[in-house]
Image: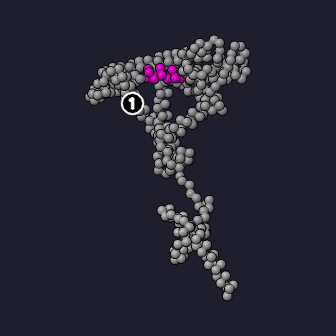
Amino acid sequence: TGVAAESSNEVTAAVLQASRYNTAALWEQMPDESFDEESANTVSPVALSEHDDELEEKDEDTTPAPASEDTTTTPDDTTTTPAPPESTKSILQHISYEVKAQLDSAEHQVWVAVLALAFGLVMMCDGEDTFNWLLIGAAFLLFCVLAMSEISQVWGVGRHSVISRVVGIEVGIAGAFAVKQSIQGVTFAVGLALGAFIAMTLQRQLVSLGADALEENQGLIVAFYTVIVGVVGIMFNRKQHVRFVIFASSMIGSVLVSSAVSWCVTTAAAKGTWVASAFPDATPKAGTWVDFVLLLVNGAAPDVGIFADSRYNLDQWRTDRIAGVSLAVLLFLGGAIPQLKAMKAKVEARERGGLHEALLSSA
């Protein structure tokens, strides 16, 4: 009996100790209540048993659930989002970026120079036909880009897809052929657009000089645009723009040819060919064809050529630039003068033909 009583007392003491520990944990979770040893000893056994049950429920709730086999994903179940549709502006930006990359590529510089030389000679020989073919080429590019953008919007394919390129080329060819068949009307439309651009530029300049009426008076603005656009449109309709086209075509063609020749000579000199021996003081510095074009049109461009950084260079008129511009001027005169003579002869022949028809009709 004595042994059983001692065992019972030991069990009771252990239960009381555990109860005090649980009671202390309970009071720690209640910040608004104060806790001490005496309050732990005065808690009723019923409260202790309820607190023990709550702790057991929390332990059961916090037990992690076994992983479900249905949540496992495989690479085959993943789907890819289609590429977003491309707008006309983004396609044009990509095309311009690709063209620039080809022009700057060191591997293609020979072909770039050859093409520049060929196009330059064509522009110097026949400016009017070159202008017409530029319009046709611009129409092809415009219709091609619009078709590729529309395909991208409807079917969600990029510009690199085969179907997008095929449709773009087909629509571009159709649009270019339509422009070629009505080149006179397209030329007149281009003249109207050019007249609007000239009127807008003049309006801004006059407003900046103090002509506020061209910004506030709507009737005056309409009359201003009507006169300028009408005059330019009439000039294009009567082919009086051909003279301007000849000048512009010869000027651009001379720059293309001069830059291509400069690139070829500099590249040959940099490789130690006969050009280097022909110019003992040469300090050749090669570059891309675009660098030689910039040297001709921009005095602040980096110096390239067979006399790059030479002691004979002036401030902005360096030796290579003087040589390139001089060659371009000679080419311009050699291309513009024959074209102007041919245009004058064509006009005179047309007038004689009209006079002859008038005489026949009167007879």
Query: Which residue appears at 61% of the width and 29% of the height?
Result: 112
269 vs 125, nearest the viewer: 269
Identify the residue at image location x=39%, y=30%. 193
Q: Is residue 184 left or right of residue 81?
A: left
- Mark 1 belongs to which amino acid? Ala
In this view, 334 is above or below 156? above
Q: Is residue 254 visible?
A: no
Q: Quadrant of residue 201?
A: top left
Q: Quadrant of the C terminus?
A: top left
Tell me residue 223's x, y (percent). Answer: 29, 26
**Residue nearest the observer in this picture, 42 or 175:** 42
Query: Residue 252 or 296: which is nearer the viewer?
Result: 296
Quadrant where the N terminus sits is: bottom right
User: In the rendered structure, which segment of residues is drawn in magenta?
Assistant: 242-254
Residue 107, relative to residue 335: is it above or below? Answer: below
**Residue that carries the numbered disc 1 in the rendered image:** 193
Q: Residues within 10 Å of mark 1 (few under 14, many from 20)?
A: some
Could one spot residue 159 in this view of the protein? Answer: yes
Magenta segment main secondary structure: helix
Tell me, yes or no, whether the highlighted magenta stretch contains residue 245.
yes
* Residue under the image location 58 percent in, 58 percent down: 78
Horizontal and vertical percent position of residue 94: 53, 39
